[in-house]
Amino acid sequence: MAYKDEKLNEEKVFKDPVHRYVHVRDRVIWDLIGTREFQRLRRIKQLGTTYLTFHGAEHSRFSHSLGVYEIVRRILVNFEDRPTWNREERLLCLCAGLLHDLGHGPFSHTFEKVFKLDHEEFTRAIILGDTQVNQILTRVGKEFPQKVADVINKTYHDKLVVSLISSQIDADRMDYLQRDAYFTGVSYGHFDMERILRVMRPLEDQVVIKESGMHAVEDYIMSRYQMYWQVYFHPVTRSADVILTKILHRVKELYHEGYTFRVQPVPFISFFEEDVSLSDYIHLDEGVVLYYFQMWEEEADPILRDLADRFVNRRLFKYTEFNPNLQMKDWMELYQLFRDVDLDPEYYLVVDSSSDLPYDFYRPGEEEERLPIHLLMPNQELKELSRQSDIVEGISGKKRTDHKLYFPRDAIEQLADDRPEKEKIKRILYR
């Protein structure tokens, strides 16, 4: 029997708090789960610094990846007898779902921004490079690793396969919304996934939804909208991200200045020098990063020492609403006041912005074209979701943006009362 068709002697199951069980029968999937690159995802949190806001948010990219695989598996069971579904693509879909987040680094998006990295590029590098994952995928077929990478990169020729992993209603989103809601303890991210799976239908180039399932999809979209603003963009989490960002910037700056660290940050050096090998990347996880943060609490540099202590011991920055279009005069005044009281504004006065577009229809030529969600009407005609749903129409194409100004309130309060700068700072920030 060909390796791609091999089944385990006995089905393996992972107990899962969201899907109850994750079922594995394919030998290829079981072998991929056992690779060092996939096991590394146990050491990368799904929600980065969110655990400092919602204490239960300790779940990993590993558990999310298993969840995405399980949703894809269940979708394909429903598709099995549909004439528009090519059963030859089954294993490809399962592998792409399992491996879609393989290249995430520690603290994911925040880490990427500081070091100008792209987790999707590293996902492709792991799949196509000298790795255990690549060895297993190559056993399926010489071209198979490239196919998996193409699906995740959204360049695979079969757009139906791509849409299962990456679209406005895909297995990735359906898992992380429910999983993140479960572990943060909020009610926003729950929706009727069972109903959505039952009404999904494969067409030539995308998954569509039977018109009778429209209300379940409305619920899903509203769940996503609420999760972004109540969890993912929570201002306290953003404060932790700001401090994390500033720690990494400070360490990088000190390294380039020739600063002598108490403990040399060896795992970070290739990142500082912007010459990161695949091996360097794979070896860096959140356990390593947090170890160095604790070491940096003892550093001689006062800024690094303070920022590391703030992150490790959750002494986060406070925040106030800030409109950069209307308050630039305030910003410039604060910038100088912070310098006058020896609080480096590059590290202690930070504007952070968040924005989200909860749903959009297809707009040709835009930088990031979004495939809309289509409803399959009883007469087999396709209609774009927002044309049928008043709820979705109300939020379609509407980008919401929020700006906050972060600062160390405790450090300001500790300034001597007779310093005129203190009252000026408080007047601007506390009003």
Image: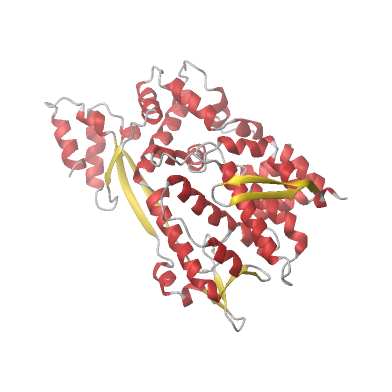
Above or below, 279 against 144 in this view is: above
Above or below, 373 against 120 in this view is: below
Residue at 66% in and 71% down? 203
- Residue 359: horizontal and vertical position, in percent? 47, 64
Label count reads 0
Above or below, 155 against 236 in this view is: below
Residue 132 at least partly seen: yes
Residue at 53% in and 60% down? 368
Name the quadrant containing residue 333: top left
- Residue 411: horizontal and vertical position, in percent? 25, 29
Judge by depth and name the residue closer to the eye, 287 or 261. 287
Judge by depth and name the residue closer to the eye, 316 or 189. 189
- Residue 314: horizontal and vertical position, in percent? 36, 32
Residue at 69% in and 66% down? 79
Taking 343 as reference, is 65 left or right?
Answer: right
- The image's colour scheme reads secondary structure
Name the quadrant containing residue 340: top left
